[in-house]
């Protein structure tokens, strides 16, 4: 049995990376790509929103290596997304927030499995 990730993380990752579908296609995009179109501050805003997922992983006890990977995903998305035109296309494809939500889910699954193996009293 797996532990379900907090709903706010799922909603935020989907909102930022895959909330909308381009009509007539299977292409999905989120507000990260849309807000990122605002010159100068758009990518900083969505990068800040993405930090919430990393902070939540930290609170859930995610290992440092995982947190670094999540920060890397977010940094790549924020920095490359800030490049005019090329960065806007990149924002639609990279999906750092969905990747980070998946990493958090894997951590929660492992933690839940370890707790179940230890038994109800933790031994």
Image (spheres, rainbow, N blue to C red):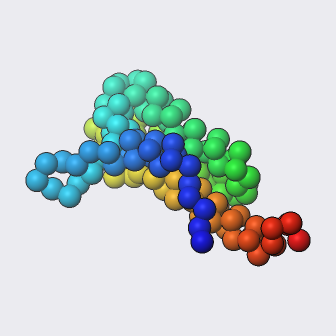
Quadrant of the snapshot with the C terminus: bottom right
| Residue 40 drawn above or below residue 57 | above
Q: Residue at x 74, y 52 (%)?
A: 61
- The residue sitting at 81% across, 67% down in the picture is 120
Coordinates of residue 88 in the picture (x, y in percent): 31, 40
Q: Residue furthest right?
A: 123
Residue 60 lies left or right of residue 49; in this view the side is right
Image check: 22 left or right of 122? left
Q: Where does the image place residue 81, in percent across and percent down from the top left?
A: 40, 40
Left or right side of 83 for 110: right
Residue 75 visible: no
Which quadrant of the figure has residue 53? Answer: top right
Q: Residue at x 64, y 60 (%)?
A: 108
- Residue 23 seen in render: yes
Image position, residue 83 (x, y; %): 37, 37
Residue situated in front as seen by the camera: 52 or 115: 115
Q: In the image, is residue 74 above or below residue 106? A: above
Residue 82: x %, y % from top left: 41, 35
In front here: 5 or 102?
Answer: 5
| Image: 95 above or below 107 | above
Which is more toward the observer, 100 or 94?
100
Q: Nearer the viewer, residue 19 or 113?
A: 113
With respect to residue 116, does 21 lie above or below?
A: above
* Image side of residue 115 versus residue 89, left or right: right
Residue with the most extreme left position: 24
């Amino acid at each position: 049995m797996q532990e379900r990730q907090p709903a706010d993380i799922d909603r935020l990752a989907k909102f930022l990376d895959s909330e909308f579908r381009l009509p007539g296609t299977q292409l999905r995009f989120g507000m990260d790509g849309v807000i990122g179109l605002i010159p100068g501050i758009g990518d900083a805003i969505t990068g800040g929103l993405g930090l919430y997922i990393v902070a939540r992983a930290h609170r859930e006890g995610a290992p440092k290596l995982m947190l670094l990977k999540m920060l890397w995903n977010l940094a790549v998305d924020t920095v490359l997304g800030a490049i005019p035109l090329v960065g806007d296309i990149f924002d639609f494809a990279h999906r750092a927030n969905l990747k980070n939500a998946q990493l958090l889910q894997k951590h929660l699954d492992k933690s839940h499995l370890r707790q179940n193996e230890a038994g109800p009293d933790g031994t």
